[in-house]
Image (tube, rainbow, N blue to C red):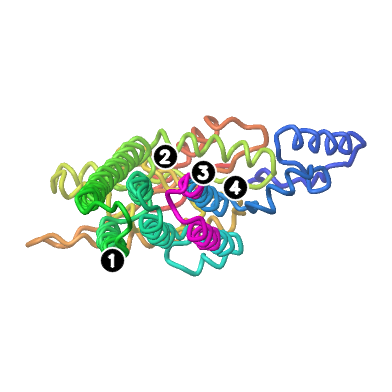
Amino acid sequence: MKGRCLHEADSPAAWHPGQAQDQHHGEDCALASGHASPRHRSFRQRLHDWVLTDDRRQRQRLTMAGLAALLMLCCMLSMHIVAAVGLADARLVNAWTVMCVAGLLIVYALIRSGYSLRFPDPSLTHAQILYAIACNAVAYVIAGPARGIALPILAVVMMFGMFGLTPRQMIGVMVYALVMFGIAGAVVEWRSEPGHSQALSLAYAVMIVVVLLSSTFLTRRVQATREHLRRQRYELAQAVEQVRKLATHDELTGLPNRRYMLEVLRLEVLRAQRSGQPLLVAQLDIDHFKTVNDTHGHAMGDRALQVFARTVRASVRASDVLARWGGEEFILLLCNTPLAPADDLLERVRHAVAAQRLERPGSPPLQMTVSIGVTCLRPGEALEEALERADRALYSAKAAGRNRVAWMT
């Protein structure tokens, strides 16, 4: 006879004055941890968010753009020092400075406004490097005798590309830089500045080629190393997942194993005791399975277990948990299921198993049946007691002739 299960008891939480104190305490904790509410944020925090946004990824992009801007400002300072000692035309340096600052402001505006998100590279790394190389090539032309300062700047610019560009993009940047500095070198030769040395220009050209080639080579090496590490991390994650699955799932059927199911059962028992929702535990056993192994071999027995697991899994709901308990025994956990629908579901499982036919070459198909013992968790009952009762119900089903569902509540 089917008895009563654990039922839900509605107990709305009562409000008490301490909740207001907890709310203020939470706000104080938020302030202490740096996550202040809008009305408690300082002017500096609001200014910081206004400049760099409160979006984490956008902040990262703006921070990297800021580092590039800092490098450009150092270059500007160097050029103005060169102009101050009379080695470069101050008017040209001022115009060059305006060009550099305009580029920095445009990049900042595109990233800060979110417009750069429309591009494949929201950080605009590629565009920033191309623009920096163009500015560097112009600096090489107008720096006069001090144009050698463009070489370390070019090396630093190329270094930024190691971590933000693909090898193909880096090769394109190298070709672009060669063209830009080739034009810059031609302009220098055309201007024929007083005291100009063609030998020194040739030395500069050689060093520019060395910087570009070495930077491109190092970028390819860095990218290859990063790809290798990425592949290793992926393989390690796959291995960890495989180990986790082997530790929690049955290798033959792919179902959760006994150890994992015990943890699920304990959690569901606690949840059912708190909520009052019914929790049903069914134990399933393939009838005469030993005969299948002894008569038809273990390979057929393994196949029967796999077919049985697939059949039952396809007959129950996604929220139900089916696990291999050991040998030919399985446990089915039915959460929040009243007795009548559960009985219909288990009968559907029984009929689905009985309808299966295992084809055998040269022999009649093999038919399986299943005996099912099911029980309902009682209020305050331990898990072990419910499992023992489900086991007794299973033996009752077998004693009654097998291929049936027996209840013991």
The amino acid marked with disc number 3 is: Val
**What is the CA distance from the residue labelled 3 to the residue labelled 1?**
91 Å
User: In this figure, what is the number of numbered marks?
Assistant: 4
Q: What element carries label 4?
A: loop
| Residue type, numbered disc 1 | Trp
Label whose residue precedes the other's in the sequence (3 or 1): 1
The image quarter in which residue 20 lies? top right
Quickly name the residue at label 4. Answer: 1
Name the mark nearer the viewer: 3 or 1: 1
Amino acid found under the numbered disc labelled 2: Tyr
- Residue 3: within the magenta? no
- What segment is highlighted magenta in the picture? 76-102
Q: What residue is pinned by disc 1?
A: 190
Q: Is residue 313 visible?
A: no
Cα distance, mark 4 to mark 2?
16 Å
Residue with the mark numbered 3: 281
Q: In this view, does 196 lie to the left or right of 275?
A: left
In depth, the one of 257 and 363 nearer the eye is 257
Q: Distance between the residues labelled 1 and 2?
A: 102 Å
Measured as percent of width and height from the top left, residue 34 is found at 70, 37
User: Mark 1 Cα within 10 Å, few/some/many (few <14, many 20+)?
Assistant: few
Which amino acid type corresponds to the residue marked 4 in the rendered image? Met
